[in-house]
Image (spheres, rainbow, N blue to C red):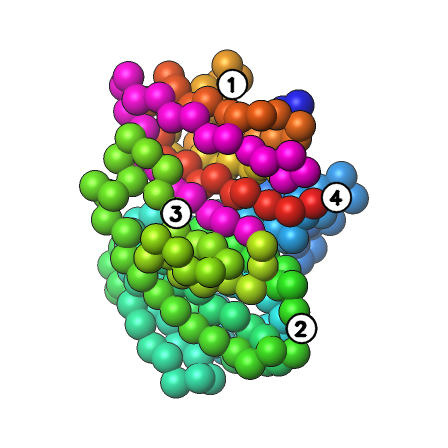
């Protein structure tokens, strides 16, 4: 069974300097029908204007992944980490027993466009942690590249949950199939472009939840970049 979440149905927060679209309930946006999928709690698509950003604030017991689509995202945290993330960079911050961080647009002239993802961990009160890795465009072309997993396999960042995150770029005649194990949930978010998933047409900002399917097939792509989550129930 496939259930589509259309881009235009998402929650919206527009603060002038921030244009944010919420796939699931977040902040002032609350929809009991969209509280998350398994341990996946947040997919926010954020566009932050030049020189602006989120001042220092705290988190606990959450795996937070930032996936930059365009521009420069400057990160600083209470663990002493500081970095400027650009396209292809994937950052994982494990909030654990507590962490404070800030996120700002690292450019004074251009906006930054990124996805922030929150995954509930399978342990609480653990030490905070940080990791970032780069996955270039070539590594994602015509395939689903593992970028986050519970064990860091295939060079992915490591998260504290029995979940996996794949990123892929599909164009033209590309076709990719992904098997889903029984009892698992698939969740695909379209970051750019358009494609079909098991015959269902999706565009940028759309997502689809997949339950009780042996596999999903991605094809009919028009310069599509996607994130696919393989999640426990």
Judge whether 55 appears above or below 153 on screen: below
Residue 107 in sight from this viewpoint:
yes
The one of 125 and 22 positioned closer to us in this rendering: 125
Alpha carbon separation for disc pair 3 and 1 = 21 Å
In the picture, the quarter occupied by the C terminus is: top right
Q: Which residue is mark 2?
A: 124
| Distance CA(mark 2)–CA(mark 3) | 25 Å
Q: Which residue is mark 4?
A: 31
Q: Earlier in the sequence, mark 1 or mark 2?
A: 2
**Among numbered discs 4 and 2, the one appearing first in the sequence:** 4
**Distance between the alpha carbons at the discs numbered 1 and 4:** 27 Å
Q: Counting residues from the N terminus, which is met first, the one under dot 2 or under dot 3?
A: 2
Q: Secondary structure at mark 4?
A: loop
User: Residue placed at 65% from the left, 69% from the top?
Assistant: 123
Badge 2 density bin: few <14, some 14–19, many ≥20, Cα 10 Å:
some
Of marks 4 and 2, the one in the foreground: 2
Whether residue 212 sits left or right of residue 102 in the image: it is: right
Circle 3/circle 4 CB separation < 8 Å: no
**Magenta residues (range):** 163-184
Residue at mark 3: 146
Q: Secondary structure at mark 1?
A: loop
Residue 45 magenta: no
Image point (62%, 63%), residue name? 121
Q: Which mark is residue 198?
A: 1
Q: CA distance from mark 3 to mark 4?
A: 30 Å
From this view, report whether residue 219 is shown above or below residue 159.
above
């Amino acid at each position: 069974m496939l259930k589509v979440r259309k881009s235009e149905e998402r929650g919206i927060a527009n603060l002038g300097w921030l244009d944010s679209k919420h796939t699931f309930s977040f902040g002032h946006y609350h929809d009991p029908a969209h509280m998350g999928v398994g341990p996946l709690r947040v997919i926010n698509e954020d566009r932050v204007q030049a020189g602006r950003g989120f001042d220092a604030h705290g988190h606990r017991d959450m795996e937070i992944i930032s996936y930059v689509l365009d521009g420069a995202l400057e990160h600083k945290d209470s663990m002493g980490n500081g970095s400027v993330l650009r396209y292809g960079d994937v950052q994982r911050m494990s909030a654990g027993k507590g962490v404070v961080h800030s996120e700002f647009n690292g450019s004074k002239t251009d906006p930054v466009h990124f996805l922030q993802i929150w995954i509930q961990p399978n342990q609480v009160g653990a030490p905070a942690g940080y990791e970032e890795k780069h996955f270039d465009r070539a590594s994602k072309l015509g395939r689903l590249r593992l970028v986050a997993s519970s064990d860091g396999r295939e060079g992915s960042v490591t998260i504290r949950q029995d979940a996996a995150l794949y990123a892929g770029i599909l164009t033209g005649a590309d076709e990719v199939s992904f098997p889903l194990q029984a009892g698992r949930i698939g969740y695909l978010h379209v970051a750019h472009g358009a494609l079909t998933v098991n015959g269902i047409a999706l565009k940028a900002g759309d997502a689809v939840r997949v339950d009780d399917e042996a596999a999903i097939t991605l094809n009919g792509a028009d310069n599509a970049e996607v994130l696919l989550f393989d999640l426990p129930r």
